[in-house]
Image: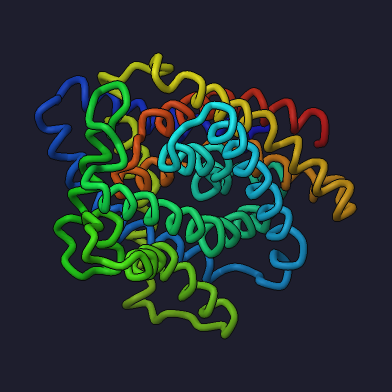
Amino acid sequence: MSGVLLGFAIVLVLVGVGFVAAWALPGEARAMQRGIAPLVYYITNPALMFLLMSDADLGAVLRTYTPIALITAAATGLLYALVAGGLLRRPAGPVAAGAMASSYVNAGNIGVPIALYAVGTTAPVVSVLIAQLLVVAPVYLSVFAWCRHRAGRAGRFAAPRSDDDGASPAADAGAAAGAGAGDGAAAAAADDPGPSRSLGATLARSLANPVTVATGLGLLAAAFCVDLPAVLGQPVEMLGHASVPLLLLLFGMSLRGQRPLGRDARAEVVLGTVLKSLVMPVLAWVVGRFLFGLDGLDLLGVVLMAALPTAQNVFLFAGHFRLATTSVRDVTLLSMLLALPVSLLVTLLLG
């Protein structure tokens, strides 16, 4: 129980610091957002993923936990797409962003203390990260690239630039990160995919983003038991440890001046929040209990990972592709507020 409380307290404090900074220093905060977004995307987040993957026990996580994470994320995202695209008739770009927000969990920071103190092992966290970074994220990034490519061919961006529907200042910062990246690995995330660029090239450059590459390198290091020399390992560790606070500060800054549950995106926000906070943990319990026969702490770890709030990386990715980030931001915020009571309930029922 203490791990659940500690993990959420850390996140809320750092998001609050970012919000207060944006309120007290509005001019400087916008400059900080434009600087933090590319720093996290290209440097600190890849370093963190490399660290987590390189220390993983691959045999323990690939047999059970990772397949459960994949099935649960795919089912939740598909449910969102069916409702938002089929019933609400939303465009492809917002549907893709909302589906990712409803199924992509914040395992990188909140999940670590929760898994350690509530379950006793980081195996559930690492398995979710493997599933998300090597399968789920590349799939969504490919869809984002297709949506952006199609919007570029139509001579317009995928997201309107208004306060109610458009990208926030943090999304602008993420887009600016890629716009100045030249031929870097993730430059496609912010380049304007005009008709002259093929869809295949856009997808290839999107899949070769820094986080996915770093995750793959970390898994190779774990598979072949490769340890970096101290002169390289310690700098990578320092950079990785900076990723979580910087990303949470960026998210907190983006909240100032925004109106949660705006009229235009209210249905998508409610749908995404319900799926993320309530439906996804239930699906994880069903899959873990009845398809894989888990019980005890193993089942608790699976359900707790599914109950985690939406990862701030979804907000960063959507901003890079100039997709509408309003609903993503609101689902992230509301799922964070609901994650603590849901996680406590899960611990009481299964712990």
Q: Is residue 309 above or below residue 264?
A: below
In the visual, does 58 lie left or right of 329?
Answer: right
**Horizontal and vertical percent for residue 273?**
56, 27
Figure colour scheme? rainbow
The residue at 17%/32% (across/down) is 29
In percent of width and height, residue 21 lies at 22, 27
- In this picture, is 60 found above or below 37? below
Q: Residue at x 30, y 21 (%)?
A: 164
Task: Tell me which corner region of the image, top left, top right, bottom left or bottom right, holds residue 264.
Answer: top left
Say which quarter of the image contains residue 327: top left
Q: Reply above or below: 322 against 275.
A: below
Residue at 55% x, 34% y: name it. Answer: 6
Quadrant (top left/top right/bottom left/bottom right) for the N terminus: top right
Q: Image check: 43 left or right of 107?
A: left
- Residue sitting nearer the eye, 111 or 290: 290
Q: Residue furthest left?
A: 27
Q: Quadrant of the C terminus?
A: top right
Q: Is residue 138 left or right of residue 182?
A: right
> Seen in the image, is 107 located left or right of residue 75?
left
Q: Is residue 174 above or below residue 342?
A: below
Q: In the rendering, at what x and y percent does residue 274 appear? A: 62, 26
Question: Does any portion of residue 288 appear in the rendered image?
Answer: yes
Pick the residue in front: 330 or 294: 330
Which residue lies most toward the front here? Answer: 154
Relative image position of residue 35 (x, y in whole percent):
18, 47
Residue 7 in view of the camera: no
Q: Residue at x 57, y 83 (%)?
A: 225
